[in-house]
Every structure is written in structure tokens, then in C-alpha cells.
Image: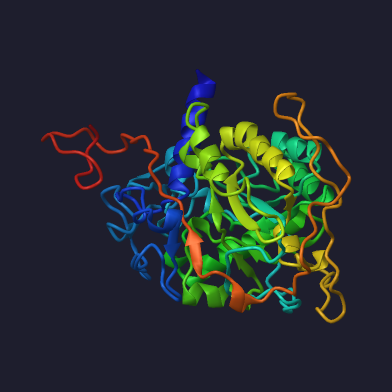
Amino acid sequence: MFRVLFLVAAAASCAVAHDGRPGRPRFLTGRSGGRVVPRSSGNDIFGPALPKLESRQVSTDNRCGVKFGTRCPNGDCCSLEGWCGKGPEYCNSPDCQLEFSDSCDGNKKPQGKDTEKVDRKKVGDVPYGQGIYDCGVDGAVALTYDDGPFTFTEDLLNLLKQYKAKATFFITGTNIGKGAINDRSKPWPALIKRMFDEGHQVASHTWSHQNLTDIKQETFRQQVLWNEVALADVLDGRFPTYLRPPYSSSNAKTDGWLADLGYHIVYFDLDTEGYLHPSPSQIQTSKDIWDKTVPGKDPATNKWLAIEHDIIEQSVHNLTEYMLKSLASNGFRSVTVGECLRDPAENWYRRMDGAGAKAAEESSAVVESTAQPTPGTDAATSVVASDAEPAATTAQPSYNPSLAKRVITKTIEVIPVPAKPNGAPSANGRCGTSFGGAR
């Protein structure tokens, strides 16, 4: 029973982690263009940002947040639905409204050395502060995993090791009740260190998965810098130069802030929507999306930047191996985002001591995956292992941002989030966020 409830909670959290708008249906627009939504330069793809409230009074009626304009008393958390209280239902990120509380898990700065004064020198050919949507190396597929580490991440690392595949992990510092990623009493530090040691790329997905366009600059800086603090604490003084905005939401202003902090902004051009299909009976839909995209395509002229989530069990235990076998049988390689952009590995991180990154003219070599995925143990679906490279590809120039696609494959949120009876019982038959009563 616990496992069933846990999985339902994880799926619901993932839905919230891709919506961020209380009381709105979990979808963006239609699916015109085959899951492709044009991205208007300089505009929030979710519409206008929520209002910024600089001066907030303490709530006197237990209501709080954007809708009510008041903050909770010290020690309380403001829930997604705008109620003050204590405990996971109120305080866990990303739901807790941290600009109206002082006790959300996202309000707590992680232990570690501050990174704010670290030099933000911009090196290499990959643009800073601009959206990157696709790879620049034919025959490469950059598998990326958001929101972890989580319960299933160790199994994912084992699977990638089995197939000699590389991936990129966009790490969230604290979310869905997992605690801080650098808390040594939890498994997360060892998993992140293993990612790095085994040649995967560790990137940022912010501290507590807030919509960057909906928060003040001070909160924005905390979301980025605090994740740096935690990651540097785990990775011996290193923190990423690559970041994926939560909800894929950024605009001209936040792009500029990320550029100032020295970040490459990464989106994607392939989304199997695994988080929308979290059960064994549903995950075939994600496989169908993959099969309509990758199999039968020529590695000499095709490449993708794909998004998945390692907080979704079926994405890890079912979909990932399906994709890895498909890549092998179709002549593609699973690589990091940095490799697929021809960015030298030393540019993927900054160092607290200032060492590491080199200018493009000093180094242009990229650490590449040298081996092809090995077959699984299932004889019916295994692929013959080979040390040979995939089909020959045409040499690619350095990444040219002017050639990048200006579209983003966007998720469509339809997983319901269980209602929480946080309000007082209704006395007039009305209930919900608009009326404040429980059912």
C-alpha cells in the first residue's frame, strides 16, 4: 500500500513540477506541429508573470500567497492553495510559496561555501543566456533527466553503465520532500558524485524548482546560487555552467540574469512525455512517441536533445532501456549535452578555486563516448554489441547558435494532483481554492 501511495504522490508532484500555476488546467496549448510550440523571444511561454508583492502583511486569517497578498507567520509555510500551516503538505517544494513563507524547504540555504564571488568568465563557443534546443553533432542523442536525484536514480545509473551510455542530469536541490542534495545522511551526495565520476554531466535545475519568471531577482539568485552551493559541496568545489529552467519558463529578463551568472540555458527538441504516462500500462504511449521520432532515421543527418525525468519509475525502469536499445540498433550514441554541443568537458563546470575552464582557442577537444551501448539480457530484443563507431557522419562545425531551432517541444500537463483538505469544513456547500472550505 505504501508503495502505491508513494508512486501516486510522485506522479502528482511531477505534474505540479510541470505546471506551476495553481487552479489552472494542466495543459499549455494544442499539440499543433507535433508536440512543438513556438517560443516567442523575450516572452514567458506560460503567459504574464504573477504579480510581485514587495511589502506583505502577516496573515490574520490563515490565508496567504499570491492570491491573498499576505505571508504566513514565522514558522509556518504557505501551501499551493494559499493556506498557512506546518508539515510536508504545506512546506515541500515546489508547491510551497516561498516568497510568502519563511519555512518552506526551499527557504533553507544549504550548507557549503558561497559561490557568489566566483569568477563568471564566459568561455567556449556555446552561447550564454540563450535558449539551446537541439544538438549540433549528427548521430548523437543527448538523454537528459530532470528533477532528481530520487529513489530510482541509482537504478538509472546502473542501466546507463550497462549500456555504456552517457546522460545529463539536471539536478534540483530540494523538491518533493527528498531533502537537500548535499545532506550526507541521505543517498543523494553519493549518487551525484557517481554521476560525475562515471562521465555523466551534472547540470542545474535550480534549488527548489520555482518558476523563474514569477519570482523577484533576489529569490531568483537564491534559486540559482544555492543549488551551486550544494553541488559544489558534493563535487569537490565544482558547480555547473548548464541549467534548465523549471517549467521550461524563462524570458528576456531571466535569460539576462542567467547570462550574468554564466549559464547556458538548455531546453529540448524531443519529449516522450514519460511523466504523463507513469504506469506500466501507460508508458507504451511514450515508447510510441519515441518510435515515431528515432527509429529509421539516418544518424548521418539526425540528432536530438531529449528530456526525461528520473523521479518517474516507469521512465527509469521501462522507457530508458527501450530507448537505449533503440539507439544502439539505429546507430546513434547516447551522449551528454556538452558533447552534443561540442563543448570541451572542462567548460561544463566552474571551480571554486577558479581552475578548470579554458577558452575555446586553448582547447577544442570534447570527451566523447567511446563505446556503443551493450545489449540487454533479453534475447528477443538484444542488440549485437560492437566496438565499432556508428555510421560515418559528416564533420560538424563548432556550435552555431544562429542555426538552432527556435521552437521548444513542450509538455502538456494532464496528471491530476490530489486535493488537500487544508481549509475549514464548508458550511454552505461551497469549497475549493475560491472559497477556502474543505469538502
User: What residue is drawn where x is 62% and y is 57%?
Assistant: 305
Towards the viewer: 54 or 29: 29
User: What residue is drawn where x is 52% and y is 21%?
Assistant: 2
Classify residue 90 as left or right of residue 233.
left
Q: Is residue 377 visible?
A: yes
What residue occupies the far bottom of the structure in this picture? Answer: 361
Classify residue 208 as left or right of residue 339.
left
Where is residue 164 shown, x and y percent of the image?
Answer: 81, 43
Query: Quarter of the image holding residue 129?
Result: bottom right
Where is residue 11 shown, x and y percent of the image?
Answer: 48, 36
Look at the picture and state if 278 lies above or below 44. above
Towards the viewer: 359 or 231: 359
Where is residue 273 shown, x and y percent of the image?
Answer: 50, 45
Towards the viewer: 34 or 438: 34
Q: Is residue 169 visible?
A: no
Query: Quarter of the image holding residue 437?
Result: top left
Where is residue 213 shown, x and y percent of the image?
Answer: 44, 67
Look at the picture and state if 420 lies above or below 24. above
User: What residue is drawn where x is 66% and y is 63%?
Assistant: 135
Classify residue 367 as left or right of residue 75.
right
What residue occupies the far left of the structure in this picture? Answer: 428
Look at the picture and state if 437 lies above or below 212. above
